[in-house]
Image (tube, rainbow, N blue to C red):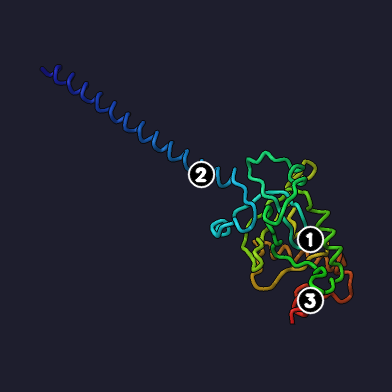
Amino acid sequence: MVSILGSKETKSGGSGGSREKEVINAVGFVGLGVASAFLGILAHKTLIRRIKNADMITPAMIDKQATLRGVVTRVGDADNFRMYHTPLLSLLRRSAILDKKLTAQDTIHVRLAGVDAPETAHFGKPAQPYANEALEWLKRTITGEKVAVKLLRKDRYGRVVGNAQLRAKWYRPWRKNVSMELTRAGYGSIYEQDGAEYDGMLDKLRKVENEARRKKRGMWKQKNVELPADYKRKHRS
């Protein structure tokens, strides 16, 4: 009698264990489906979807300080440029991008974070000394290059203020910070007006600017340097 009861209990326990496994497997499949859906959405946003221009950059992307990668297609002034965003899964070659006939709506307008370059001639205002040299330096340095831009905010002109890094190359296996290199070359001073963004590099920028001043690079070759901020204030009044 005892052995019969024991046999029944064993069979019952085996059946319950089987049902538990089925439930666990079902939950696992549901979890896998949810995870796959989430990854699909994430891939669409970060790996596949191209951000055509600054208008497509959302407040959430700014809040998260997302990083966008792309190719520099044009340099307009010595402290800003236009970038063609290339998602991580993009198969488009850099040469194909540079051969495209692009409009302002096809590229993201980026303002370099933390720096101010000499002003070029605009709206009847004369260019500052070394403005053209600064512009040519930036063109040579970044036009056609791959960059990674960390989004910090948007300015009143609708541009993205970003910390831009030149991508590493086989002969230079590290990134170069564009704001830092512009300042090091003597063509940038620290931007200290309202809305300034430094992304934690203010102390390094000060050190690099002081070095450029001391070694009289670029615009610091002049005896009396008018900072871009002072130039803009003078012509605004």
For marks 1 and 2, the one nearer the N-term is 2
- Residue marked by disc 2: 41
29 is higher (above) or lower (below) than 67:
above
Residue 216 x, y percent position in the rendering: 87, 67
Q: Which mark is residue 182?
A: 1
Q: Nearer the viewer, residue 139 or 56?
A: 56
Q: Quadrant of residue 140?
A: bottom right
Q: CA distance from mark 3 to mark 1?
A: 19 Å
Task: Indicate the secondary structure of the residue bearing disc 3.
Answer: helix
For marks 3 and 1, the one nearer the N-term is 1
Tell me the quadrant of the picture where the C terminus can be found.
bottom right
Q: Residue at x 73, y 64 (%)?
A: 205
Task: Identify the amino acid type marked 2.
Answer: Ile
- Residue marked by disc 3: 231
Q: State the residue lying farthest toward the bottom.
A: 237
Q: Nearer the viewer, residue 163 or 1?
A: 163
Q: Quadrant of residue 13?
A: top left
Task: Indicate the secondary structure of the residue bearing disc 1.
Answer: helix
For marks 2 and 3, the one nearer the N-term is 2
Task: Indicate the secondary structure of the residue bearing disc 2.
Answer: helix
